[in-house]
Amino acid sequence: MDLATPAAPVGEELAALHRDRRLATDYPRLTALLAEATDEERERAGRFLARLDPAEVRRAHPALPTLRTAVTGDGTLSPLLPALAAEAARHGLLLPVTPSPYNTWVHELSDPRSDLHTARPELVLCVLSAAVVTAELPSPWHVDDVRRVLEAKTALIEGLVDRFTATGDGTLVLNTLLLPRELTAQLLDHRSRARLGIAWREANARLLRLAEHHPRLVVLDLDPLAAETPAHDVRLSTYAKVHLSPGLLARYAREAAHLARRLLGRTKKALVLDLDGTLWGGILGDDGPEGIEVGDGPRGEAFTAFQRVARQIGSQGVLLAVVSKNDPEPVSRVLRDHPGMTLREDDFVRVTANWQPKHLNLRALADDLGIGADSFVFADDSPYECGLVRREIPEAAVVRLDEEPADHVLRLLADNWFDSAELTTEDRARPAHYRDDLARKDFRHGFDSLEGYLRELAVTVRLAPAAPEDVPRLSQITLRTNQFNLTTVRLGRADVETLLTRPDTLVLTIRSTDRFGDNGTVGAVIATRHGTALVIDNFLLSCRVFARGIEQAVIAAVLRHARSTGITEVYGVHRPTARNGKTADFYAHHGFTPVPTGALPAPVPPHTAPDRAPDRAPAPDDRTVHRHDLRTIPNVPDHLRLDATLEGPTP
């Protein structure tokens, strides 16, 4: 098969799946199909998928990441549902949607007995248009009338957010209101138009600031989306009350799917870049360093703009790497010495230049970094290389660039692959941490035994109760950590803050340092006391610090602390997912014995509260429970130093 082109047009394949009633059984195939689909093909796929029963998909694929979703707002929002279904499938997600009746958003958000609240959605999309303001203007109207209505509506929305966050446990999504030209054009003097623009933007700024005070609120700014497509279709708005155009709703759905991906812990961690045709124009091996296009001329400036964006992304904690079919020495010289380059060798955690197949180099890079290949976004201008990586590493995201470098930036940024709720100090330090990890691997090669290496590594582990300033990082760990994550329950900031207030709950941060530097906060333990029993609700550890004895030191410290505070037994729960298999025997390896699920001192439902949508929704039988009687506690490995300060909330 020619990897540069699909075997059949995407639309034909989707139609065949629909015709043969295989959309549910072949649902995972849609990720690759829709990745290369046109807007029209995605729209058609959305119409098929919106009629698909989510329960049928779940029966066929019980491990599929799923997020219960509700849609409400003003006006008619039916065009949003197919777009949302297509975007979810494109990202390998399932978003079962509960739509609200027409224009009932105030009731649905405020009444805890509403259908929306009863559905217990994990993601609530409240889509608002300018009609919530314009419908209440008198005739004739003045700018002060608009200001008055804006003030009343923003106050109403603030109250709804307070009520929703007090009674619901999902993430609420609002949006800014687009200022319609047909409103401003009704004012005949420019001074009044300016006053209207000021009032409207002040109201939108007030909406955007709401997210600073409500961790489970996201406010989407619609202005950047409206800059890409017409935002209003006057006939649809007048006759069908579709106040935001189908094109804008499709872009809204794209943003909503990105958010769902983040809430499900599917945020990418590394951007892996090709060189020839990607970071510069031309072929280095043929044109030489002097012949490549970068820095000067229109095309060279386009490649420079792309490099600047990649460097900006890397400055916020995303790992940058190179995988290129080139000889290493010329690549190194260009990255080090070429005057037109913005990206330099130090910007990358690894530069791989050889003639091996790129998918093999990507697998090797994942092993070196200690992360899954599903953490990669691979950007290349070659249809062949993109097709090969998409086929051989389907879990990686592939950004297909083309021959026009001016489009590179838009193609890379189209899917918000690296979104996070909040940027932390740990994020900015992450690339340096991974470069240090690679130095550790090189250091390891100088030792005949792992024991000798670990002793010289001089690991120090600090275990302490979490403080308020740890909340953003702890939430991020639960959202981003997949391999050493014993339950994969995702916690937002508000969830972590709630845990810190509970007197029966112990939330511990794990930090580590060694001879190469400070690794930062690399893990967490969450445990709850039930009488004389302690239940470890979750134990998480960054993949960067696997196999250094840290997990053994932490579990030993937790068990010792439990025994010293009157606990007689400790339970641990494990929920298997496709990505945490390496933790399956963790408890057994550290002296715990398997017990029936019913032996837990307090029954733990399949979705532990607060529930933040684990990678899968396992049935109770999927969980394993282990018990430790505290008679024999594992030793802290003698190659590391443990500093455990556990005077905080007593478990």
Image (cartoon, rainbow, N blue to C red):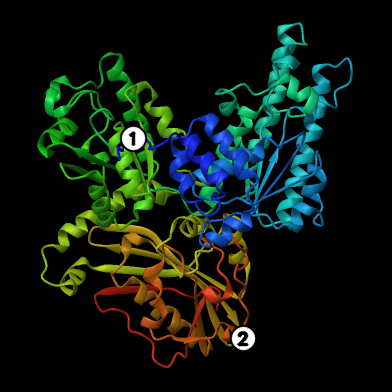
Badge 2 is on which residue?
A: 531
| Residue at 50% in and 84% down | 570
Residues at marks 1 and 2, CA–CA distance in whole angstroms: 52 Å
Horizontal and vertical percent for residue 267?
Answer: 45, 49
Q: Secondary structure at mark 2?
A: loop
Q: Is residue 417 visible?
A: no
Instruction: Classify residue 110 as left or right of residue 275.
Output: right
Tag 1: amino acid? Arg
Tag 2: amino acid? Gly
| Residue at 36% in and 72% down | 551
Badge 1 is on which residue?
A: 311
Task: Say above or below: 254 vs 436.
Answer: above
Horizontal and vertical percent for residue 51?
Answer: 65, 46
Give the quadrant of residue 411.
Answer: top left
Q: Camera-side residue: 127 or 168? A: 127
Q: Secondary structure at mark 1?
A: helix
**For the N terminus, which image quadrant?**
top left
**For the C terminus, which image quadrant?**
bottom right
Horizontal and vertical percent for residue 28?
Answer: 47, 51
